[in-house]
Image: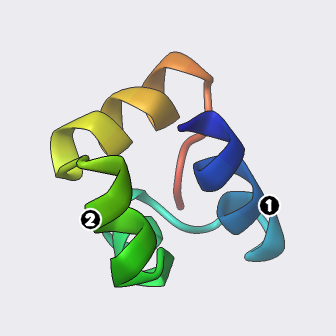
Amino acid sequence: MLSVVKPIYEENKSRYGYRRVILSIDSKILSKLNVGRDRIRKVLRDNGLLGI
């Protein structure tokens, strides 16, 4: 999961929070991974990735 979220976060100069990360992830990938907003939020929080 981190391998999907971190590149999106870094491509956008570390400004994206979980809402924008979710919107940036392709819907096909999101459904394949079977994740929701809470999991994306947890991945960002656990790895110290904070949006502005």
Residue type indicated by callout 1: Glu
Give residue 10's mark.
1
Q: Position of residue 45 (x, y in %)?
A: 45, 27
Write the residue at 25% across / 47% down. Answer: 35
Query: In the figure, 20 relative to 33: above or below?
Result: below
Query: In the figure, 6 relative to 32: above or below?
Result: above
Using the image as rendered, state which of residue 41 and residue 50 is in the foreground.
Answer: 41
Residue type indicated by callout 2: Ser
Residue annotated with mark 2: 31
Using the image as rendered, state which of residue 18 and residue 3 is in the foreground.
Answer: 3
Question: How far apart are the two marked residues, 2 and 1, measured between alpha carbons?
Answer: 22 Å
Is 11 positioned to the left or the right of 35 in the image?
right
Q: Position of residue 46 (x, y in %)?
A: 49, 17
* Number of other residues with Cα within 10 Å of mark 1, as a class: few under 14, some 14 to 19, many 20 or more: few
* Number of other residues with Cα within 10 Å of mark 2, as a class: few under 14, some 14 to 19, many 20 or more: few
Q: Position of residue 19 (x, y in %)?
A: 30, 68
**Secondary-structure class at tag 2:** helix
Residue positioned most to the front: 32
